[in-house]
Image (tube, rainbow, N blue to C red):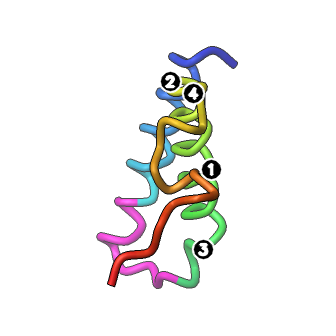
Amino acid sequence: MDINQLQNLYQENARQLEQKLLHGASWKEVSEQRHAVTELAITIYRRLNPSPLEHPAEHRTRRRTR
């Protein structure tokens, strides 16, 4: 899929998830859909930002702050 298709799919799935939650679905009931939306968001992010080193959370040598 190209980035536009992924973004459209994400938007549609996120809208459906939001509607289910607004109409009383439990967090557990929509677990699979939440994971699907999250995976789409990750895929889109990685397509738009191909270098994993650009995101601080992806650095293996990042330092912990207290």
* Residue at numbered disc 2: 48
Labels 2 and 3: the sequence-earlier one: 3
Q: Nearer the viewer, mark 2 or mark 1?
A: 2
Three-letter residue code for mark 1:
Glu
Range of the magenta residues? 18-27
Labels 2 and 1: the sequence-earlier one: 1
| Image quarter in which the N terminus is found | top right
CA separation in Å, label 2 and label 3: 26 Å
* 56, 30: nearer the viewer: 56
| Mark 1 and mark 4 residues within 8 Å of each other at the beta carbon | no
Three-letter residue code for mark 3:
Ser
Answer above or below: position of 63 versus 14.
below
Residue 39's tag is 1
Secondary structure at badge 1 equals helix
* 39, 61: nearer the viewer: 61
Crowding at label 1, few (<14), some or many (≥20) Cα neighbours within 10 Å? few
Q: At which x and y percent is residue 63?
A: 47, 67
Three-letter residue code for mark 2:
Leu
* Residue at numbered disc 3: 31
At a point 57% along the width and 52% down the height, the residue shown is 59
**Total marks in image:** 4
Q: At which x and y percent is residue 39?
A: 62, 50
CA separation in Å, label 1 and label 4: 11 Å
CA separation in Å, label 2 and label 1: 14 Å
Crowding at label 2, few (<14), some or many (≥20) Cα neighbours within 10 Å? few
**3 horizontally vs 25: left or right:** right
Q: Nearer the viewer, mark 2 or mark 3?
A: 2
| Mark 3 and mark 1 residues within 8 Å of each other at the beta carbon | no
Secondary structure at badge 4 equals helix
* Residue at numbered disc 4: 6
